[in-house]
Image (tube, rainbow, N blue to C red):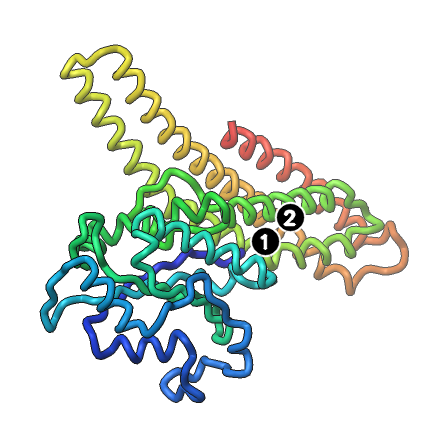
Amino acid sequence: MEKAQYAIMRFAKYKGPEIGNIEAHNERTKEKYASNPDVDTSRSKYNFHLVKPPGKYRAESERQIAAAGCRTRKDSIRMIETLFTASPEFFKGKKRAEIRVFFEEALHFLEQHQSKETIISAVVHMDEKTPHMHLCFVPLTEDGRLSAKDIMGNKKKLTWWQDEFWKHMVKKFPDLERGESASLTGRDHIPPRVFKEMTRLTKQKSKLEDLLTGINPFNAKSRAEEICKILDSYIPSVEKMDTLLRKYGVAFTKTASENKKLKTKNAELEESLASAQKVSTTGASASIGWWKCAGASRSFIAGSRVIMTLYNCMLPIVGARKASSSNPFSKSAGMSCCLYLRIVRLFLIESIICFWFLV
């Protein structure tokens, strides 16, 4: 299965003296970076700015704070640095122009929630293992106060930032995921990578069906070998998919349960018909999401039972390969034919069971 691709955003607060060190790293003013061996200075020429700093970071932050008429203390937060990036898998195979679009979208996101004028610098580093952007801004609020607390907030506000960032980025990059467990976020969808894996497994199952349909005494040995090769990867993948779908099933069940409680409460309060219909629609959507997931899970479980049965039946055929003669109607060929009939019979029974689960 493809690895998850996460959109990543992190905040860091700086009070004063350390701002110079942050600038030295971000703007690549050093010749060597002993503390960060990932920096490849031969590739630093590929770094680029989306917002160029007008001067020194500390001087610019002090200028903005003074212009806003804010008083500061020794421990006042004078600058916030935001790191934007994504999982390494997201950037694989992407050209420089495509990578630039990603970080431009990240910049647009921050500009929706923070004044452009407060941004000191936004520089993208291409000279480390994974492309990332350092965006530094002065934590000035809309009403002109210096307050990192109001901007970053508590744990709840930080979760809100992560949710909003993902919602913004996924519009243009649908493969990106939120970065938290579905059981925590309670989301009502399955990521694209999971659907892709389900599609791949479905294709493998179809191929197995085609191979089994065409078995006869003449090709039983070669078909058995090919089937066993597919099963080696198919069975572990099905088990992994079943575990994954169960994880998402927890979130869907929780959502459906919450919606059911809301519907009951609304009935007790005798709300208007329109309101009740709206809640009912919400509950139905969550339930449908869960049953789609559960149906897919049952389908793959039933499918794995089919393939495991076929696998056990095919083992004697593989063992009979050495004993078979060139005569297609020899004893081993006759045994293969009998096994073929057993396989077809079991396959038909399991297919009916599989169809019942899907319906």
Residue drawn where x is 54% and y is 78% of the image: 43
Of 280 and 222, which appears nearest the observer? 280
Kindly identify which residue carries mark 2.
Answer: 204
Picture coordinates of residue 228, whole percent (x, y) = 66, 57
Residue drawn where x is 43% and y is 37% of the image: 294
Kindly identify which residue carries mark 1.
Answer: 234
Q: Is residue 291 above or below residue 311?
A: above
Residue drawn where x is 37% and y is 41% of the image: 249
Quadrant of the image occupied by residue 81: bottom left
State yes or no: discs 1 and 2 in contact (Cβ < 8 Å).
yes
Mark 1 or mark 2: which comes first in sequence?
Answer: 2
Picture coordinates of residue 129, whole percent (x, y) = 49, 73
Picture coordinates of residue 289, whole percent (x, y) = 41, 33
- Tell me if residue 170 can be seen: yes
Q: Amino acid at mark 1?
A: Tyr
Of 313 and 59, which appears nearest the observer? 59
Residue drawn where x is 72% and y is 58% of the image: 225
Dot 1 falls on a residue whose secondary structure is helix
